Image (cartoon, grey):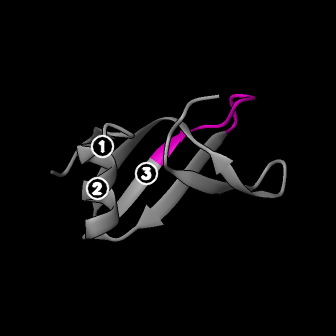
Amino acid sequence: MAASGITAYSVKTKTKNVPMIDPVIDIKSGRYIATGKDAEGNKMAAIMGKATAEEHVKNGNAKKGSGW
């Protein structure tokens, strides 16, 4: 498990607050969207605000993707 600060809902396993591994934050249409995978390799996404997204990038929890 990665010690990432980003958690998301896993649609496949129907569980909340699943830690996201290797998240990448993209900006699409003014929204900050973190995409990554859970421990089983299922794709996940989380939408967040600008302040939250910048905090995760600053802390090294996520990488900047497209749109920055």
Number of residues whose C-alpha sits closer than 10 Å to that of mark 1, classed few (under 14), some (14–19) or many (20 or more): few
Q: Position of residue 10 (x, y in %)?
A: 72, 52
Residue 59 has which mark?
A: 1
Distance Cα–Cα, label 2 vs label 1: 6 Å
Residue 31: which quarter of the image?
bottom left
Residue 48: which quarter of the image?
bottom left
Number of residues whose C-alpha sits closer than 10 Å to that of mark 3, classed few (under 14), some (14–19) or many (20 or more): many
What's the residue type where badge 2 is placed? Glu
Q: Are the residues tagged 3 and 1 within 8 Å (C-beta)?
A: no
Mark 1 lies on a secondary structure that is loop
**Residue 66 shows up from this direction:** yes
Mark 2 lies on a secondary structure that is helix
Q: Write the start and end of the magenta stretch as one range.
A: 35-42
Q: Position of residue 18 (x, y in %)?
A: 69, 49
Q: Which residue is mark 3?
A: 34
Assess whether residue 20 is covered by the magenta stretch.
Answer: no
Residue extending farthest to the left is: 68
**Residue 31 shows up from this direction:** no
Q: Position of residue 35 (x, y in %)?
A: 48, 45
Q: Earlier in the sequence, mark 3 or mark 1?
A: 3
Q: Earlier in the sequence, mark 3 or mark 2?
A: 3
Distance Cα–Cα, label 3 vs label 1: 15 Å
What's the residue type where badge 1 is placed? Asn
Q: Which residue is mark 2?
A: 55
